[in-house]
Amino acid sequence: MKRIITAFIFIGILISCNSSDKTKISTRESSETKTVTESTSNDKQLNTIESNESLIATSLMAAPEESRSKCKVIGYNMAGEFVTLREGDNEFIVLADNPNQDGFNAACYHKDLEPFMARGRALRAEGKTGQEIFAMREAEMKSGQLKISPGLTLHIYYGAKTMYDPETSKVEGAQLRYVVYMPWATAESTGLPAAPMAPNHPWIMNPGTHRAHIMISPLPEEIE
């Protein structure tokens, strides 16, 4: 009789253990499923830049937010033609990313810089090298044919990727850097170093030349 009772108790323990294990497995599976679902739902849907509209929207991220609605946008369209993508009536011109080149690179600059920028584009179209363009514009600045007023700015929005968030128009991984033109300025005349002292610090580039400028490269948002 004792053997029978003992057998029943042992069977009861086995059933209880199996039930408990199944409950734990079910709870764990449910938790894992929830985690995967939450992770999937939090992922942003990124799109490729496939139209002139998306090219304009992403390139405008180079401009100050409050000025984007009235910026003129120029550059290569999706067909590979250099055109005015959108007219504007404020102080900024946006040079759109070239969709036929790797990565993303858009720029926004004060409209008074356009003669200088246009000259560079024209010389590049003629097949001139970077060194030749630098030398020719240097000579034209010295002669007064070209002019850059000190303090004119250039904003650059750049990155290695080209996917973007259609809700915000932000390009994946892209960041900003800024150029403040100071023709002929030097480290001595500005008090700025000729090389950055640390990440996120301003410095003067091309000192003593027509292209002397203060370079400011903010750290990416995820590092700040």
Image (cartoon, rainbow, N blue to C red):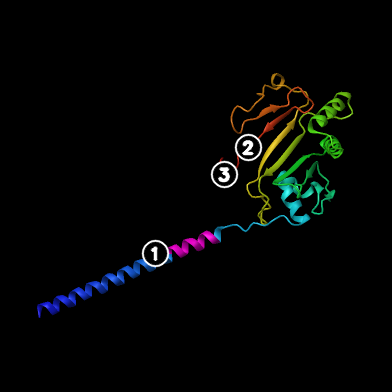
| Residue at 69% over, 21% down | 187
Q: Are marks 2 and 1 in contact (CB under 8 Å)?
A: no
Q: Amino acid at mark 3?
A: Glu
Judging depth in this view, the residue of 48 and 214 nearest the camera is 48
13 is within the stretch colored magenta: no
First in sequence, mark 2 or 1: give its number. Answer: 1
Q: Which element type, helix, strand or loop, lies under badge 3?
A: loop
For the image, the number of numbered tags is: 3
Q: Amino acid at mark 1?
A: Arg
In percent of width and height, residue 155 lies at 72, 39
Between the residue at mark 3 and the residue at mark 1, the CA separation in whole angstroms equals 32 Å
Q: Which residue is mark 1?
A: 28
| Residue at 43% over, 66% down | 30
> Can residue 156 be seen by looking at this rendering?
yes
Q: Amino acid at mark 2?
A: Pro
| Residue at 83% over, 46% down | 89
Q: Which residue is mark 2?
A: 218
Q: Which element type, helix, strand or loop, lies under badge 2?
A: loop
Q: Main secondary structure of the magenta part?
A: helix
Few, some or many C-alpha atoms within 10 Å of disc 1 (few <14, some 14-19, many ≥20)? few
Q: Which residue is mark 3?
A: 222
Q: Quarter holding the C terminus?
A: top right
Q: Looking at the image, which residue sits at the far top?
A: 188
Few, some or many C-alpha atoms within 10 Å of disc 3 (few <14, some 14-19, many ≥20)? few
Q: In which image quadrant can residue 26 be found? A: bottom left
Q: Nearer the viewer, mark 3 or mark 1?
A: 1
Is 133 situated left or right of 168 in this image?
right
Q: Nearer the viewer, mark 2 or mark 1?
A: 1
